[in-house]
Every structure is written in structure tokens, then in C-alpha cells.
Image (tube, rainbow, N blue to C red):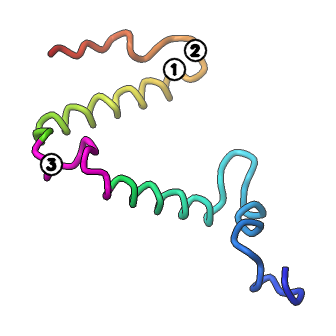
């Protein structure tokens, strides 16, 4: 802190003070989100980037559907030792 004012605190210590035991605070969450979005938007090989002509929109929808299924199954089976991917078959 500078001049004993909370308005003059640096971002790093402020972010550490906001952090909770189970998650990041608002400052670090917004910083990480902003950086992720910038990296994603600048990556021409990102799987959702249809401008590169490499991935069709239907494939993007399939990838998003499978990813959401796996995340949902993993969160539902979090307390069990079951793998959520056993049921998945991705044919070529």
C-alpha cells in the first residue's frame, strides 16, 4: 500500500487478497479470462476459428457437444472413480 490508502494498492497483492480458498478473486479471474480470450482470438489454428478453412462448422458443434458431455459426466462422477469417457466413441 502506498500512503496508507487501499486505492493505491498494486494489482498483484490486491488479487492475492481477493482470493478465496476454493477459487480466484474477481481481479485474477477477469485478468485470466481476458488473456485467454486474446490468445484464442489471435490463434488462427483454434478449433472454433472458421476463417482458417480447416474446420467445418458441423465439426465445431460436435467437438463442443462432446466436450460439454465429458465435463458434465466428470462433474457428475466426481466422487466416484469412474471415467466419463468409457461410453464415448468418436468414429472417423
What residue appears at the point 46 percent right and 63 percent down from the top-left corner? Answer: 34
Disc 1, disc 3: CB below 8 Å? no
For mark 3, give the secondary structure. helix
Count neighbours of disc 1 (C-alpha within 10 A) and say few if under 14, some if 14 to 19, many if 20 or more.
few
Q: Would residue 76 appear left or right of 44 to someone viewing this image?
A: right
Q: Which of 45 and 10 is in front in this view?
A: 45
Question: Which quarter of the picture shows residue 78?
Answer: top right
Q: How many labels does the image show?
A: 3
Question: Which quarter of the picture shows residue 65?
Answer: top left
5 shown above or below 50:
below
Instruction: Tell me the magenta residue range.
Output: 41-53
What residue appears at the point 42 percent right and 30 percent down from the top-left corner? Answer: 72
The nearer-to-camera label among 1 and 3 is 3
For mark 2, give the secondary structure. loop
Residue at the disc numbered 1: 77
Q: Which of 12 and 76 is in front in this view?
A: 12
Separation (CA) of disc 2 from disc 1: 5 Å
Disc 2, disc 1: CB below 8 Å? yes
In the rendered view of the protein, which quadrant contains the C terminus?
A: top left
Residue at the disc numbered 2: 80
Q: Determine if the magenta segment contains residue 74.
A: no
Residue at the disc numbered 3: 52
Separation (CA) of disc 1 from disc 3: 37 Å
Amino acid at each position: 500500500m502506498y500512503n496508507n490508502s487501499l486505492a493505491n494498492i498494486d494489482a498483484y497483492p490486491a488479487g492475492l487478497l481477493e482470493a478465496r480458498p476454493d477459487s480466484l478473486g474477481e481481479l485474477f479471474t477477469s485478468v485470466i479470462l481476458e488473456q485467454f480470450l486474446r490468445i484464442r482470438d489471435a490463434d488462427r489454428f483454434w478449433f472454433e476459428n472458421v476463417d482458417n478453412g480447416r474446420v467445418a462448422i458441423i465439426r465445431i458443434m460436435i467437438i463442443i457437444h462432446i466436450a460439454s458431455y465429458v465435463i458434465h459426466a466428470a462433474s457428475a462422477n466426481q466422487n466416484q472413480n469412474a471415467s466419463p469417457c468409457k461410453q464415448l466413441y468418436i468414429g472417423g
